[in-house]
Image (cartoon, rainbow, N blue to C red):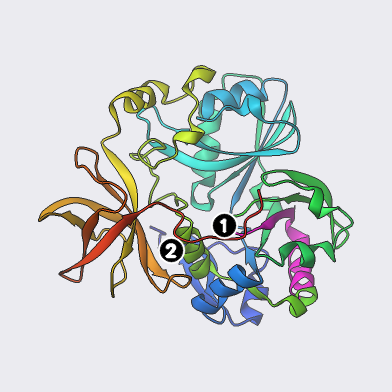
Amino acid sequence: MQNSNTPLKRTPLFESHQSLKAKLIDFGGWEMPVLYKGVMEEHRAVRNAAGLFDVSHMGEIEIKGRESLALLQYLVTNDVSRLKDFGVQYTVMCYPNGGAVDDLLIYRHSEDHYLLCVNASNTDKDFNWILENNKTSAEVTNISQHTAQLAIQGPESEKILQKLTDTDLSSILYYHFANGKVCGIDSLISRTGYTGEDGFEVYLSSESAAGVWEEILSVGKDEGIQPVGLGARDTLRLEMGYPLYGCELDSEHGPMGAGLHWVVKPNKGDFVGREVIIKQKEQGPPVRLIGFEIQGRGIPRAEYAIWKNGEKIGRVTSGTFSPSLNRGVGLGYVCNKTTVEIGDELEIEIRSNRVPCKVVKAPFCETNVRK
Protein backbone atom coordinates (compact mmCIF):
# COMPACT_ATOMS: atom_id res chain seq x y z
CA MET A 1 0.00 0.00 0.00
CA GLN A 2 1.33 3.41 -0.97
CA ASN A 3 2.12 5.69 1.98
CA SER A 4 -0.29 8.64 1.84
CA ASN A 5 2.63 11.01 2.42
CA THR A 6 4.61 9.59 -0.50
CA PRO A 7 3.93 11.35 -3.81
CA LEU A 8 2.87 9.08 -6.66
CA LYS A 9 5.42 8.40 -9.37
CA ARG A 10 4.64 9.58 -12.88
CA THR A 11 5.80 8.37 -16.28
CA PRO A 12 7.18 10.79 -18.90
CA LEU A 13 3.71 10.67 -20.53
CA PHE A 14 1.75 12.05 -17.58
CA GLU A 15 0.94 15.34 -19.30
CA SER A 16 -0.09 13.46 -22.45
CA HIS A 17 -2.58 11.45 -20.39
CA GLN A 18 -3.92 14.63 -18.83
CA SER A 19 -4.41 16.23 -22.24
CA LEU A 20 -6.40 13.17 -23.35
CA LYS A 21 -8.54 13.52 -20.20
CA ALA A 22 -7.60 10.07 -18.95
CA LYS A 23 -8.96 8.86 -15.63
CA LEU A 24 -5.85 8.51 -13.46
CA ILE A 25 -5.48 6.13 -10.51
CA ASP A 26 -2.88 4.99 -8.00
CA PHE A 27 -1.42 1.80 -9.46
CA GLY A 28 1.28 0.39 -7.19
CA GLY A 29 2.55 3.86 -6.35
CA TRP A 30 2.26 5.17 -9.91
CA GLU A 31 -0.30 7.70 -11.16
CA MET A 32 -1.47 5.86 -14.26
CA PRO A 33 -4.37 6.05 -16.74
CA VAL A 34 -7.03 3.40 -16.06
CA LEU A 35 -9.14 4.51 -19.04
CA TYR A 36 -9.58 7.24 -21.64
CA LYS A 37 -12.92 6.71 -23.42
CA GLY A 38 -13.92 3.50 -21.69
CA VAL A 39 -12.65 0.00 -20.96
CA MET A 40 -15.00 -1.77 -23.39
CA GLU A 41 -14.19 0.53 -26.31
CA GLU A 42 -10.45 0.42 -25.67
CA HIS A 43 -10.48 -3.36 -25.31
CA ARG A 44 -12.27 -3.81 -28.63
CA ALA A 45 -9.93 -1.35 -30.35
CA VAL A 46 -7.01 -3.65 -29.47
CA ARG A 47 -8.84 -6.79 -30.58
CA ASN A 48 -10.04 -5.25 -33.87
CA ALA A 49 -7.54 -2.52 -34.79
CA ALA A 50 -4.80 -1.21 -32.49
CA GLY A 51 -4.23 0.25 -29.06
CA LEU A 52 -1.34 2.24 -27.61
CA PHE A 53 -0.30 1.68 -23.99
CA ASP A 54 2.04 3.64 -21.75
CA VAL A 55 3.97 0.95 -19.88
CA SER A 56 6.86 3.21 -18.88
CA HIS A 57 6.24 2.32 -15.24
CA MET A 58 7.73 -1.14 -15.89
CA GLY A 59 11.25 -1.69 -14.63
CA GLU A 60 14.36 -2.30 -16.73
CA ILE A 61 17.50 -3.91 -15.32
CA GLU A 62 20.64 -4.41 -17.37
CA ILE A 63 23.11 -7.24 -16.77
CA LYS A 64 26.52 -7.12 -18.44
CA GLY A 65 29.76 -9.05 -18.29
CA ARG A 66 31.16 -12.47 -19.14
CA GLU A 67 29.35 -14.12 -16.20
CA SER A 68 25.94 -12.63 -17.03
CA LEU A 69 24.54 -15.96 -18.19
CA ALA A 70 25.75 -17.75 -15.06
CA LEU A 71 23.99 -15.18 -12.87
CA LEU A 72 20.73 -15.42 -14.79
CA GLN A 73 20.78 -19.21 -14.82
CA TYR A 74 20.99 -19.17 -11.02
CA LEU A 75 18.26 -16.53 -10.62
CA VAL A 76 15.47 -17.76 -12.91
CA THR A 77 13.59 -20.98 -13.63
CA ASN A 78 13.89 -21.03 -17.42
CA ASP A 79 17.00 -22.07 -19.35
CA VAL A 80 18.54 -18.79 -20.46
CA SER A 81 21.28 -20.65 -22.36
CA ARG A 82 18.67 -21.46 -25.01
CA LEU A 83 18.33 -17.77 -25.87
CA LYS A 84 20.07 -16.54 -29.01
CA ASP A 85 21.01 -12.93 -29.78
CA PHE A 86 17.89 -10.76 -30.25
CA GLY A 87 15.71 -13.39 -28.60
CA VAL A 88 13.27 -12.82 -25.73
CA GLN A 89 12.36 -15.28 -22.99
CA TYR A 90 9.59 -15.29 -20.39
CA THR A 91 10.59 -16.68 -17.00
CA VAL A 92 10.04 -16.54 -13.25
CA MET A 93 12.48 -15.54 -10.52
CA CYS A 94 11.83 -17.53 -7.34
CA TYR A 95 12.49 -17.49 -3.62
CA PRO A 96 13.94 -20.62 -1.95
CA ASN A 97 10.36 -21.64 -1.01
CA GLY A 98 9.36 -21.81 -4.69
CA GLY A 99 7.25 -18.65 -4.48
CA ALA A 100 7.76 -15.92 -7.05
CA VAL A 101 9.98 -12.89 -6.61
CA ASP A 102 8.62 -11.78 -9.99
CA ASP A 103 7.83 -12.90 -13.52
CA LEU A 104 9.81 -11.12 -16.20
CA LEU A 105 11.15 -10.96 -19.75
CA ILE A 106 14.81 -11.46 -20.61
CA TYR A 107 16.21 -9.83 -23.77
CA ARG A 108 19.56 -11.12 -25.03
CA HIS A 109 21.67 -8.56 -26.89
CA SER A 110 24.75 -10.77 -26.79
CA GLU A 111 26.35 -13.47 -24.64
CA ASP A 112 27.50 -10.82 -22.16
CA HIS A 113 24.62 -8.31 -22.35
CA TYR A 114 21.01 -8.87 -21.22
CA LEU A 115 18.04 -6.62 -20.46
CA LEU A 116 15.37 -7.63 -17.94
CA CYS A 117 11.86 -6.14 -18.01
CA VAL A 118 10.27 -6.53 -14.56
CA ASN A 119 6.98 -5.54 -13.00
CA ALA A 120 6.74 -1.90 -11.96
CA SER A 121 5.95 -2.39 -8.27
CA ASN A 122 8.74 -4.98 -8.00
CA THR A 123 11.57 -3.04 -9.62
CA ASP A 124 13.47 -2.06 -6.48
CA LYS A 125 12.81 -5.42 -4.82
CA ASP A 126 13.99 -7.32 -7.90
CA PHE A 127 17.09 -5.18 -8.29
CA ASN A 128 18.07 -5.71 -4.66
CA TRP A 129 17.34 -9.44 -4.88
CA ILE A 130 19.61 -9.77 -7.91
CA LEU A 131 22.38 -7.84 -6.15
CA GLU A 132 22.05 -9.99 -3.02
CA ASN A 133 22.34 -13.19 -5.06
CA ASN A 134 25.07 -12.04 -7.41
CA LYS A 135 28.17 -14.09 -6.63
CA THR A 136 29.62 -13.39 -10.07
CA SER A 137 31.51 -10.56 -11.74
CA ALA A 138 28.42 -9.53 -13.76
CA GLU A 139 27.45 -5.87 -13.52
CA VAL A 140 23.83 -5.17 -12.61
CA THR A 141 22.33 -1.73 -13.32
CA ASN A 142 18.81 -0.40 -12.80
CA ILE A 143 18.13 1.77 -15.89
CA SER A 144 14.38 2.19 -15.27
CA GLN A 145 14.55 5.91 -14.58
CA HIS A 146 16.04 6.61 -17.99
CA THR A 147 13.88 4.17 -19.96
CA ALA A 148 10.34 4.54 -21.28
CA GLN A 149 8.24 1.80 -22.84
CA LEU A 150 5.32 2.04 -25.25
CA ALA A 151 3.24 -0.96 -26.32
CA ILE A 152 1.28 -0.93 -29.59
CA GLN A 153 -0.99 -3.95 -29.77
CA GLY A 154 -3.59 -5.23 -32.23
CA PRO A 155 -3.92 -6.53 -35.80
CA GLU A 156 -3.08 -3.13 -37.32
CA SER A 157 0.01 -2.58 -35.13
CA GLU A 158 2.64 -3.52 -37.69
CA LYS A 159 1.09 -1.35 -40.39
CA ILE A 160 0.98 1.67 -38.07
CA LEU A 161 4.43 1.34 -36.53
CA GLN A 162 6.05 0.62 -39.91
CA LYS A 163 5.19 4.20 -40.94
CA LEU A 164 7.60 5.47 -38.29
CA THR A 165 10.61 3.17 -38.67
CA ASP A 166 12.98 1.92 -41.37
CA THR A 167 13.34 -1.39 -39.51
CA ASP A 168 11.55 -4.18 -41.38
CA LEU A 169 9.00 -5.13 -38.73
CA SER A 170 7.81 -8.17 -40.70
CA SER A 171 11.26 -9.72 -40.16
CA ILE A 172 10.95 -9.58 -36.35
CA LEU A 173 9.65 -12.95 -35.17
CA TYR A 174 7.40 -13.43 -32.16
CA TYR A 175 9.44 -13.08 -28.94
CA HIS A 176 12.35 -11.50 -30.80
CA PHE A 177 13.54 -7.91 -31.07
CA ALA A 178 15.61 -5.55 -33.17
CA ASN A 179 17.55 -2.39 -32.45
CA GLY A 180 16.36 0.42 -34.70
CA LYS A 181 14.88 3.90 -34.79
CA VAL A 182 11.29 4.96 -34.22
CA CYS A 183 10.60 8.56 -35.25
CA GLY A 184 14.37 8.89 -35.56
CA ILE A 185 14.86 7.86 -31.91
CA ASP A 186 17.13 4.93 -30.99
CA SER A 187 14.82 2.16 -29.81
CA LEU A 188 14.58 -1.51 -28.94
CA ILE A 189 11.61 -2.86 -30.92
CA SER A 190 10.24 -6.11 -29.50
CA ARG A 191 7.49 -8.33 -30.93
CA THR A 192 5.97 -9.08 -27.53
CA GLY A 193 2.95 -7.98 -25.54
CA TYR A 194 0.46 -8.71 -22.80
CA THR A 195 -2.80 -8.75 -24.78
CA GLY A 196 -2.74 -11.91 -26.89
CA GLU A 197 -2.67 -9.80 -30.05
CA ASP A 198 0.16 -9.23 -32.47
CA GLY A 199 2.09 -6.11 -31.61
CA PHE A 200 5.27 -4.49 -30.38
CA GLU A 201 6.83 -3.05 -27.26
CA VAL A 202 9.18 -0.14 -27.89
CA TYR A 203 11.89 0.77 -25.37
CA LEU A 204 13.37 4.26 -25.76
CA SER A 205 14.78 7.16 -23.75
CA SER A 206 12.39 8.79 -21.29
CA GLU A 207 12.85 12.24 -22.79
CA SER A 208 11.76 11.00 -26.22
CA ALA A 209 8.64 9.13 -25.13
CA ALA A 210 6.02 11.89 -25.35
CA GLY A 211 6.93 12.83 -28.92
CA VAL A 212 6.86 9.23 -30.12
CA TRP A 213 3.54 8.64 -28.33
CA GLU A 214 1.96 11.57 -30.17
CA GLU A 215 3.36 10.44 -33.53
CA ILE A 216 2.02 6.90 -33.17
CA LEU A 217 -1.46 8.15 -32.31
CA SER A 218 -1.33 10.60 -35.23
CA VAL A 219 -0.21 8.19 -37.96
CA GLY A 220 -2.53 5.44 -36.69
CA LYS A 221 -5.77 7.42 -36.91
CA ASP A 222 -6.88 5.87 -40.22
CA GLU A 223 -6.36 2.38 -38.78
CA GLY A 224 -8.44 3.19 -35.70
CA ILE A 225 -5.74 3.31 -33.05
CA GLN A 226 -6.75 4.40 -29.55
CA PRO A 227 -4.84 5.10 -26.35
CA VAL A 228 -5.58 2.30 -23.89
CA GLY A 229 -5.49 2.34 -20.10
CA LEU A 230 -4.85 -0.21 -17.39
CA GLY A 231 -8.51 -1.24 -17.26
CA ALA A 232 -8.51 -2.73 -20.75
CA ARG A 233 -4.97 -4.00 -20.27
CA ASP A 234 -6.35 -6.17 -17.48
CA THR A 235 -9.39 -7.45 -19.40
CA LEU A 236 -7.18 -8.24 -22.40
CA ARG A 237 -4.64 -10.22 -20.38
CA LEU A 238 -7.37 -12.02 -18.47
CA GLU A 239 -9.06 -13.21 -21.68
CA MET A 240 -5.72 -14.87 -22.45
CA GLY A 241 -5.32 -16.33 -18.97
CA TYR A 242 -2.02 -14.50 -18.46
CA PRO A 243 -0.89 -14.30 -14.81
CA LEU A 244 -0.42 -10.98 -13.05
CA TYR A 245 2.07 -10.58 -10.23
CA GLY A 246 0.22 -9.86 -7.00
CA CYS A 247 -2.77 -11.91 -8.16
CA GLU A 248 -1.70 -15.27 -9.60
CA LEU A 249 1.96 -14.98 -8.59
CA ASP A 250 3.43 -13.77 -5.31
CA SER A 251 5.94 -14.76 -2.64
CA GLU A 252 3.88 -17.85 -1.74
CA HIS A 253 2.66 -18.83 -5.20
CA GLY A 254 5.20 -19.76 -7.85
CA PRO A 255 5.26 -21.12 -11.38
CA MET A 256 4.19 -24.71 -10.64
CA GLY A 257 0.85 -23.83 -9.08
CA ALA A 258 0.25 -21.08 -11.65
CA GLY A 259 0.46 -23.50 -14.56
CA LEU A 260 3.78 -22.16 -15.78
CA HIS A 261 5.52 -25.54 -15.93
CA TRP A 262 6.83 -24.67 -19.39
CA VAL A 263 9.13 -21.97 -17.99
CA VAL A 264 10.66 -24.33 -15.41
CA LYS A 265 13.74 -26.30 -16.49
CA PRO A 266 15.04 -28.25 -13.45
CA ASN A 267 17.59 -30.14 -15.55
CA LYS A 268 19.53 -27.00 -16.49
CA GLY A 269 21.34 -26.97 -13.15
CA ASP A 270 20.97 -25.23 -9.81
CA PHE A 271 18.73 -22.19 -9.38
CA VAL A 272 17.00 -20.52 -6.45
CA GLY A 273 13.93 -22.54 -5.44
CA ARG A 274 14.90 -25.62 -7.48
CA GLU A 275 14.56 -28.19 -4.67
CA VAL A 276 11.04 -27.11 -3.73
CA ILE A 277 9.99 -26.86 -7.37
CA ILE A 278 11.23 -30.39 -8.11
CA LYS A 279 9.24 -31.64 -5.10
CA GLN A 280 6.15 -29.81 -6.35
CA LYS A 281 6.65 -31.29 -9.79
CA GLU A 282 6.72 -34.79 -8.31
CA GLN A 283 3.98 -34.40 -5.68
CA GLY A 284 2.01 -31.46 -7.02
CA PRO A 285 1.82 -27.93 -5.54
CA PRO A 286 -0.61 -27.24 -2.66
CA VAL A 287 -2.94 -25.31 -4.98
CA ARG A 288 -3.30 -25.02 -8.74
CA LEU A 289 -4.69 -22.37 -11.01
CA ILE A 290 -7.87 -22.92 -13.04
CA GLY A 291 -9.77 -20.84 -15.57
CA PHE A 292 -13.55 -20.53 -15.52
CA GLU A 293 -16.49 -18.87 -17.28
CA ILE A 294 -19.59 -17.67 -15.46
CA GLN A 295 -22.77 -19.38 -16.67
CA GLY A 296 -25.29 -16.54 -16.70
CA ARG A 297 -24.99 -13.16 -15.00
CA GLY A 298 -22.34 -12.11 -12.54
CA ILE A 299 -18.79 -10.78 -12.56
CA PRO A 300 -16.16 -12.63 -10.50
CA ARG A 301 -13.67 -10.59 -8.49
CA ALA A 302 -10.48 -11.36 -6.59
CA GLU A 303 -10.91 -13.26 -3.30
CA TYR A 304 -14.43 -14.51 -4.09
CA ALA A 305 -14.85 -18.10 -2.86
CA ILE A 306 -14.93 -21.06 -5.25
CA TRP A 307 -17.28 -23.92 -4.31
CA LYS A 308 -17.76 -27.51 -5.46
CA ASN A 309 -20.60 -29.71 -4.25
CA GLY A 310 -21.17 -27.51 -1.20
CA GLU A 311 -17.50 -27.39 -0.21
CA LYS A 312 -15.31 -24.31 -0.44
CA ILE A 313 -12.29 -25.41 -2.50
CA GLY A 314 -10.50 -22.19 -3.41
CA ARG A 315 -10.58 -18.52 -4.26
CA VAL A 316 -10.67 -16.26 -7.30
CA THR A 317 -7.37 -14.52 -8.03
CA SER A 318 -8.54 -12.37 -10.98
CA GLY A 319 -11.95 -11.86 -12.55
CA THR A 320 -13.67 -9.55 -15.00
CA PHE A 321 -16.41 -9.16 -17.59
CA SER A 322 -15.01 -10.29 -20.93
CA PRO A 323 -15.89 -7.80 -23.70
CA SER A 324 -15.11 -10.47 -26.30
CA LEU A 325 -17.34 -13.17 -24.80
CA ASN A 326 -19.95 -10.96 -23.07
CA ARG A 327 -19.71 -12.96 -19.87
CA GLY A 328 -17.70 -13.12 -16.68
CA VAL A 329 -14.39 -14.97 -16.75
CA GLY A 330 -11.70 -15.51 -14.19
CA LEU A 331 -8.74 -17.36 -12.77
CA GLY A 332 -8.55 -18.92 -9.35
CA TYR A 333 -6.60 -21.24 -7.08
CA VAL A 334 -8.19 -24.50 -5.95
CA CYS A 335 -6.87 -27.08 -3.51
CA ASN A 336 -4.82 -29.59 -5.46
CA LYS A 337 -6.36 -32.45 -3.44
CA THR A 338 -9.75 -31.60 -4.94
CA THR A 339 -10.45 -33.15 -8.32
CA VAL A 340 -11.29 -30.37 -10.76
CA GLU A 341 -11.30 -31.08 -14.49
CA ILE A 342 -11.99 -29.07 -17.64
CA GLY A 343 -15.76 -28.95 -18.14
CA ASP A 344 -16.63 -29.35 -14.45
CA GLU A 345 -19.42 -27.23 -12.99
CA LEU A 346 -18.41 -25.14 -9.98
CA GLU A 347 -19.84 -22.11 -8.18
CA ILE A 348 -18.43 -18.67 -7.47
CA GLU A 349 -19.75 -16.83 -4.43
CA ILE A 350 -20.73 -13.37 -5.73
CA ARG A 351 -22.37 -11.05 -3.18
CA SER A 352 -23.54 -13.98 -1.01
CA ASN A 353 -25.00 -15.81 -4.03
CA ARG A 354 -23.38 -18.88 -5.52
CA VAL A 355 -23.29 -18.41 -9.28
CA PRO A 356 -22.65 -21.40 -11.58
CA CYS A 357 -19.44 -21.47 -13.60
CA LYS A 358 -17.70 -23.94 -15.88
CA VAL A 359 -14.02 -24.83 -15.73
CA VAL A 360 -12.40 -24.03 -19.09
CA LYS A 361 -8.91 -24.00 -20.51
CA ALA A 362 -7.33 -20.60 -21.08
CA PRO A 363 -7.11 -18.65 -23.30
CA PHE A 364 -10.82 -17.93 -23.16
CA CYS A 365 -10.99 -16.57 -26.73
CA GLU A 366 -9.08 -16.71 -30.01
CA THR A 367 -6.83 -13.81 -31.00
CA ASN A 368 -4.61 -12.71 -33.86
CA VAL A 369 -1.22 -13.18 -32.21
CA ARG A 370 1.52 -14.04 -34.68
CA LYS A 371 3.97 -16.76 -33.63
Q: Secondary structure at mark 1?
A: loop
Is there any visible trace of residue 147 in the rendered image? yes
**Residue 28 appears in the picture as rendered:** no
Q: Nearer the viewer, residue 108 or 220?
A: 220
| Pair 1/2: label in front | 1
Three-letter amino acid code at the position of disc 1: Gly
Of residues 341 and 177, the one nearer the viewer is 341
Can you identify the residue that label 1 sits on? 196
Alpha-carbon span between mark 1 and mark 2: 38 Å
Residue 207: in magenta span: yes
Residue 359: percent from left, percent from top: 31, 55
Give the residue type that dot 2 points to.
Asn
* Closer-to-camera residue (163/302): 163
Which residues are the magenta region? 197-217
- Vertical arrangement, residue 19 with respect to residue 86, above or below: below
* Marked residue nearer the N-terminal end (1 or 2): 2
Q: Residue at 79%, 69% (x, y): give it.
A: 211
Q: Residue at x 64, y 81 (%)?
A: 20
Residue plotted at (39% across, 38% down) = 254
Return the residue at label 2: 5
| Residue 322 x/y as whole percent | 43, 69
